[in-house]
Amino acid sequence: MIPAQFDYVAPTTVEEALAALRQYGDDAKLLAGGQSLLPVLRMRLNAPEWIIDLGRIDSLRGVREDGDAIVIGAMTPHSVVGSDPLVAQHAALVTKAVAELADAQIRHRGTFGGALAHADPAGDLGGPVRALDAEFVIAGANGTRTVSADDFFVDLFETAISEDEILTEVRIPKHTGWGAHHEKMVRVAHQWPICAVAATARVEGGTIADIGIGLANMGNTPLRAGGVEEALRGQPATEDSVRAACARAAEGTSPPSDLNGSADYRNHVVQVMCRRAVMGALEGAGA
Amino acid sequence: MTAVEAQPEVKEIGRDRRRKEDARLITGRTRWTDNISLNGMLHLAMVRSPFAHARITTVDTRAAEESPGVVGVFTGEDLADTQGACINAWAITTDQVTPAHTPLPIDRVAFAGETVAVVVARSAAEARDAAELVEVDYDELPAALDLKEAAEATPENGGALAHPDLGTNKSALWRFDSAEAGTGGNVDEAIAVARTDGIVLEREYRQQRLIPAFMEPRSVVVDPTGEQITVWSATQIPHILRFALAATTGVPESKIRVIAPDVGGGFGGKLQQTPEEMVAFAVARRLGKPVKYTETRSESLLSAHHGRDQWQKLTLAATKDGHVTGLKVELLADLGAYVALVGGGVPVLGAFMFNAIYKFPAYQFSCQTVLTNKTWTDAYRGAGRPEATYAVERLMDELAAELGKDPLEVRELNWIKHEEFPFTTVAGLEYDSGNYEAATARAKELFGYDDLRAEQRRRRDAGDTVQLGIGVSTFTEMCGLAPSRVLGQLNYGAGGWEAASVRMLPTGKVEVITGASAHGQGHETAFSQIVADRLGVPFEDVEILHGDTQVVPRGMDTYGSRSLVVGGEALVRAADKVLEKAKPIAAHLLEASVDDIEFSNGRFGVRGTDQGIALTEIATASFAAHNLPDGVEPGIDADATYDPVNFNFPHGTHLCAMEVDTETGETRMRKYTCVDDIGVIINPLIVSGQVHGGLVQGIAQALWEEAVYDEAGTLVSGSFADYLLPTAADTISFDIDHTTSPATSNTLGTKGVGEAGTIASTPAVVNAVVDAVRHLGVDDIRMPCTPERVWNAINRAGSGGGTVGAAAPHFDESTGMSGNVDRTTGGNEA
Ligand SMILES: Cc1cc2nc3c(=O)[nH]c(=O)nc-3n(C[C@H](O)[C@H](O)[C@H](O)COP(=O)(O)OP(=O)(O)OC[C@H]3O[C@@H](n4cnc5c(N)ncnc54)[C@H](O)[C@@H]3O)c2cc1C
């Protein structure tokens, strides 16, 4: 499999990368870990004239703490995110989702920002970042702007990042002490989820004080199970209340039908998986 | 046969030798076809049809011809006189309808992915770039896609015809009836009796289409320089390919040398004479330059032949106590767009196996092969036998359920008892040896059958969310294709013998030549072990040469679990002939009578003395030829060709425990145990590898793999994101063991093992999944048992439904990040 010919630049700063984007415009593609872009190039589903490799921009890599948030650089590989203690402590849902993302080789090369910028609705990270109310920091010609997770995902493979912009980091409000659980259905291990539910919850005195639930592959973008969250906030952390609330998990979804399952089936199974994810999160939260 | 009395002490046979070929195969530092580069070599890229069925109106090659590095662009018309044809070697009936198959079609394409033109350039990248510039105009034609609809289509009813000029999609109807053949009773009578006083089970099973998905994509290099044309190809069948090239292009066979260098897997998928090989051959001759073509993985999934794809209609009659009285099998088999090399013969190979290990008194089989506008189908690991085994082993579980009996008990009631061998079956085959009781007893013990049944009952009673099921498959298969006479009776185009030579080199080393050309199975190791034992020489001193028609003049190649049982026997016979030739020389040099010479451990000795001479010394002496007996020719090399008198019949008991999540339909394998009887084992390590790999391939049919086409005839599962091949992460550790009933049909007592795991495991898994939810009203789940199908089967009637065909694959234009693509639902398979 041979991609069409392209030219290649590897800037070392975000500014240089932005300048390259401005210069080559439509004809350029940013390269992160290449785990989604390279298959697309090799299958000739896309043929950009320029590849701008973000791999040498050190400032885009790493995890740090910043007040009430932890900040994950866009070019941080999944494997680093997955083993980072700050992430595990303050955003356990991400740790759990990353552990199940693709296989070890892909986790080694693929990046946190690349996966989110790619915005595959079947990606494992969309659900967690929505459930955790993450914010996306996007750099452009006029400086940086911050976009909420709710606004970041626009449509199938489409985000709030414009063609002349770069996602630099993702800020996740600390969810310290929250329980977390990622429920992912696959048929073989290296597969994108047929459906995935990411749930994180805080329990106070046997009551669900707060909860976030994100869904993958249930629509053209990662979704938030708002109805279930609403039904559960302030409710007792019991199986009965969870079961009742999770009947709303398919509200507002528009899942695809594909080789792995029909839309109807996904709308059924998301309810079961939501219940299991929430129960897992509650258990983790000490309920 | 041999006149040698004493055999060397057994040292190598039965030994866990690590495979001597692995270091080079695993590191890739070897002669994969794509690693071969020749001076001035040009590269090919294929232009392929995006349509399942279309008339080619114009092919505009001008832009491609002007593209950098391009040397030429050829269409079917350009190569019409030289491209030859892809042949079908097995017309299963005298009136088989066989469409002509030109490698590059001239005016019509018959499946999506068919080659339409070839671009030749100085580099592979330039060829690929230019291929995109070839403009082909098509007029789309109605495509025959659904197997059942295609079988019914006629010009009168307006159904789509895969090849309109043939007037039908029906290729051949092959029948067997035990009453007519005199091998058993009348099935219709048995069914009629059972309807009034007995049990009749009527079932329909779907064998989904699979893709062999070997590791090394197909590749071919053709070098026309010099007196001969040399073809390197990633093929299982160098000898058959040479024949086909010669027979269809008019180039004398003596001018063609075919080499299958190291070949990275095949599973039957490289048992083919491919259009790409023919095109490369034609282009190299046309330009007088070496050319190379290596397919991409996408091309491989799309256009290398597929396997299985049958509808199986089954009627089983039994008495009320569970004795089967008759089995009637009606198959529809999808050939795809052309009748491939073995093509329609694949289901016929299954015809002899539906009666499996059982003493069915009456049996009838019919198979209608059908042409459709999809990728052609041919042999895939097991070829016909997995399909047959699946059907009968599913039915035996159904019969047990109907009777409320244990499925092993019902099988035992019907199987051939060990003291009844040799046994002639209702399909007319003579099973030489076997012991189903022993294999089953061992399997039950290893599996912990009774404990798992108890757990199953507990979970059922408790109404657990996750239920447990146990699946049984007591399989047999026919191995060692094949007695030439039988092939002749079946109208196959060639024989089934195998050839071998043993060359004793003057330095004492041994070169062995075999016509069974390996593609990853470990022939070099196992064959070395056999020869080392037979000749009493060190394992390391034996070199196995194969896969080159110039080195190995005669061979029938590797498929159908034949290499060891046919090729290995040829080796034994060649080795024995070497000993026979060496013996008079030994007597002469030892100044003894031939009658007093005995051979053991690599030495000829004089009985009753300590005098002796090594075989290797005789090799040297016969090379020098200074002192040979009168009238004895120099050299003790020997050739042998072995034509088997019968197939052989490995068997085994496979037990599988599956957990099924009744809320989601997800399945999880809990335990898999198999006890195979494959006769005498040459190398247990290689056998384990074959069994483990085979099991995974069969389990994959049950749970994961399916080639799916959309309503336009486009392959949706065209990448590994959508065609789900399992990896180690998806499998558990299997418990495998063996019982041994030596085959009586060959000297070593060996039986085939290459396909056993694949044949046996598929029904074991599906039986287990069905068994887990049978109490919820389920009696079938269509393969692959996706979570959705399982869930549907539990919650709705039926076997879970077809796969949504019109869904977008994971990698398509939308993944290409060029705007939105509608991902709406498509139709279901009928
Ligand atoms: C076999 C396989 C299985 C997989 N399974 C899963 C799975 O189960 N779950 C899952 O979630 N993912 C899976 N993936 C995808 C994986 O997560 C990829 O790593 C990810 O989708 C893309 O990340 P990347 O760093 O490789 O980005 P790339 O492939 O390099 O880029 C992807 C896209 O994002 C753009 N982009 C990248 N970085 C930026 C940036 N900083 N700013 C703006 N745009 C940017 C690129 O231009 C490109 O369009 C799988 C991939 C493969 C090959």
Image (spheres, rainbow, N blue to C red):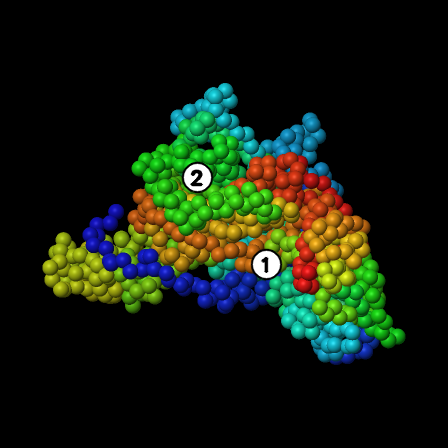
Q: Which quarter of the rendered image does ligand 1 occupy? A: bottom right
Q: CA distance from mark 1 to mark 2?
A: 48 Å
Instruction: Tell me the SS state at disc 1.
Output: strand
**x and y, in percent, of residue B186 in the image:** 45, 23
Mark 2, Cα crowd under 10 Å, few <14 / some 14-19 / many 20+, is: some
From the image, tell me which residue sits under label 1: B294
In the rendered image, the residue lying farthest to the right is A142
**x and y, in percent, of residue B505 in the image:** 30, 64
Please, which chain is the residue tagged with disc 1 on? B
Q: Are marks 1 and 2 in contact (CB under 8 Å)?
A: no
Please, which chain is the residue tagged with disc 2 on? B
From the image, tell me which residue sits under label 2: B408
Query: Which residue shows up at 36% across the image and 41% down it?
Result: B437
**x and y, in percent, of residue A272 in the image:** 69, 50
**Mark 1 or 2, nearer chain start:** 1
In the rendered image, the residue lying farthest to the front is A205
Q: Amino acid at mark 2?
A: Leu
Tell me the number on the disc at residue A120: none
Mark 1, Cα crowd under 10 Å, few <14 / some 14-19 / many 20+, is: many
Query: Which residue shows up at 74% across the image and 77% down it?
Result: A65
Quick check: B823 left or right of A107?
right
Q: Amino acid at mark 1?
A: Thr
Quarter placement of the C terminus of chain B? top right
